[in-house]
Amino acid sequence: MTRILFIPLTTLLFVAFIPLGWHTHRVAGVRVWVPDDWKVETRNNTLSATSPDGEVYVGYIIASASDFEHTLESLTNDLRSVVQDAKFDNTHDDFAIDGMPAWGFGGTGTHDGTPVEMRLELIYTPKKRVLIVVAVGSHSGLEHHLQEVVQMLRGIKKA
């Protein structure tokens, strides 16, 4: 009887410690956290997350180091097609996330007449790929989801 109870109990304990909301990108060698109530879509080398109220978007795009410039240029062009009057800060921050070298910069613009803020971060992953993280949101949306967005941007881990 104890052995019969032991197996379900250990399984239950194991399941309880599986981190919910974590998504692994094996090619890049990283894990990213997304809140459980956010809408997540994956396509090719991209994971997109949208807040439940649709006010904030966070995208994770993988590029090879050799194709990085093209991918970043394409991404900024895509952002400019969605975000009107997009302006990017010419200065950037250098930092590290889980020991991975990173740099990032911000920007502003409008989307459907609403002012938005943008943040792009580039992280050199253990598998010699570049993870481009882009966050776009209205001022009120970013304020409301600030803790989640910060955790999503800073909570990237090596897989």
Image: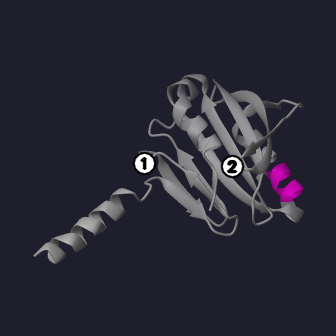
Between 30 and 111, the residue placed more toward the observer is: 30
As shown in the figure, which amino acid type bears the numbered disc 1? Asp
Q: In the visual, does 35 lie left or right of 146?
A: left
- Graded by Cα atoms within 10 Å as few (under 14), some (14 to 19) or many (20 or more), the crowding at tag 2 reads few
Q: In the visual, does 14 lie left or right of 46?
A: left
Query: Within the magenta stretch, is there residue 99?
Result: no
Magenta-highlighted stretch: main secondary structure? helix
Q: Residue 13's x, y, as percent?
A: 31, 61
* Type of colouring: one colour
Q: Give the residue at x 47% y 49%.
A: 39
Q: Residue 59's x, y, as percent?
A: 64, 49
Q: Residue 20's x, y, as percent?
A: 43, 54
Q: Residue 32's x, y, as percent?
A: 59, 53
For the record, the magenta segment spans 68-74
Q: Quadrant of the N terminus?
A: bottom left
Per the image, label 2 sits on a secondary structure element best described as loop
Between 55 and 119, the residue placed more toward the observer is: 119
As shown in the figure, which amino acid type bears the numbered disc 2? Asp
Q: Which mark is residue 92?
A: none
Q: Give the residue at x 52% y 48%.
A: 34
> Measured along the vertical axis of the image, is residue 115 above or below residue 157?
above
Q: Give the residue pinned by disc 2.
A: 98
Most extreme residue toward the left is 1
> Measured along the vertical axis of the image, is residue 69 above or below residue 66?
above
Q: Which mark is residue 36?
A: 1
Per the image, label 1 sits on a secondary structure element best described as loop
Of callouts 1 and 2, the N-terminal one? 1
> Measured along the vertical axis of the image, is residue 11 above or below residue 34?
below
